Image (spheres, rainbow, N blue to C red):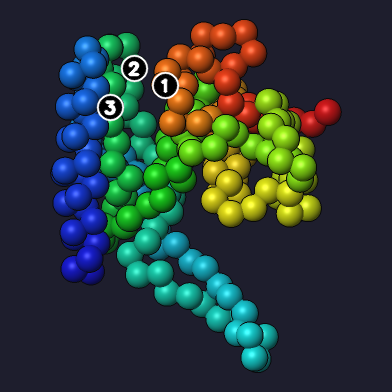
């Protein structure tokens, strides 16, 4: 509990305001908020299980104050929809009892994008995008194709939760989700304003 207080201070305070300030320094208008403001992100405790290697019995893993979005209250974000103000949202949620939960930032972004039925969800990472089993870049995936890549083990490591988040977002109504390399200058502009895009685009449906 003491640790999650520090997490909230760092994410909702220091880092959140640093990002908002950087956007403003680049010429934009930004306001820093957290998922606890106006109960933007209502969260529940994240539950995970694992098999004991000896007994092979499923046991519950207590992840402490790690949560997952239960409901996104979009009313606060609707205030910004017809303005040029960019909300910077710290991935902190509130439980029914007011308890603070730390939420994976990708998961929070996907849930918010889905709740808003956003046209596009952009996930910045440190690789070009999704690669196939032969390490070749894939520019476009349907949701069915993405699930097959996960099921066959072609996609591993940190790319799995990113793909899962993209799949959840398109299932909720986001037109497209894109995983792209945030290390490349102007990566977002390249994705949004070039004909073929820049990262791996995930679309609902199948081929």
Q: Nearer the viewer, mark 2 or mark 3?
A: 3
- Of mark 1 and mark 3, the one earlier in the sequence is 3
Indicate whether 61 appears above or below 161: below
Q: Are marks 1 and 3 in contact (CB under 8 Å)?
A: no
User: Mark 1 — residue?
Assistant: 185
Residue shown at the point (63%, 85%) measured from the top left: 53
Q: Secondary structure at mark 2?
A: helix
- Of mark 2 and mark 3, the one earlier in the sequence is 2
Residue shown at the point (24%, 22%) measured from the top left: 23
Residue situated furthest right in the rendering: 207
Q: Is residue 205 left or right of residue 44?
A: right
- Of mark 1 and mark 2, the one earlier in the sequence is 2
User: Mark 2 — residue?
Assistant: 81
Residue shown at the point (28%, 27%) measured from the top left: 87
Q: Residue 29 appears at what percent x and percent y?
A: 21, 17
Q: Secondary structure at mark 3?
A: strand
Residue situated furthest bottom in the rendering: 55
Residue shown at the point (42%, 74%) measured from the top left: 62
User: Mark 3 — residue?
Assistant: 87
């Amino acid at each position: 509990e003491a640790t999650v207080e520090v997490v909230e201070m760092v994410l909702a305070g220091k880092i959140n305001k640093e990002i908002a300030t950087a956007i403003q320094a680049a010429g934009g208008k930004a306001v820093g908020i957290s998922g606890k403001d106006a109960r933007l992100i209502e969260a529940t405790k994240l539950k995970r299980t694992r098999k004991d290697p000896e007994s092979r019995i499923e046991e519950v893993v207590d992840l402490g104050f790690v949560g997952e979005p239960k409901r996104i209250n979009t009313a606060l974000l609707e205030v910004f929809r017809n303005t040029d103000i960019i909300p910077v949202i710290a991935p902190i949620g509130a439980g029914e009892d007011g308890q603070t939960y730390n939420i994976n930032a990708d998961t929070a972004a996907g849930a918010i994008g889905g709740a808003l039925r956003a046209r596009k969800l952009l996930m910045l990472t440190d690789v070009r995008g999704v690669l196939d089993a032969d390490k070749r870049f894939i520019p476009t995936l349907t949701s069915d194709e993405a699930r097959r890549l996960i099921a066959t083990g072609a996609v591993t490591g940190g790319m799995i939760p990113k793909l899962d988040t993209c799949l959840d977002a398109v299932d909720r109504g986001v037109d497209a989700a894109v995983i792209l390399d945030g290390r490349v200058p102007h990566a977002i502009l390249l994705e949004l304003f070039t004909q073929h895009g820049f990262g791996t685009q995930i679309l609902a449906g199948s081929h």
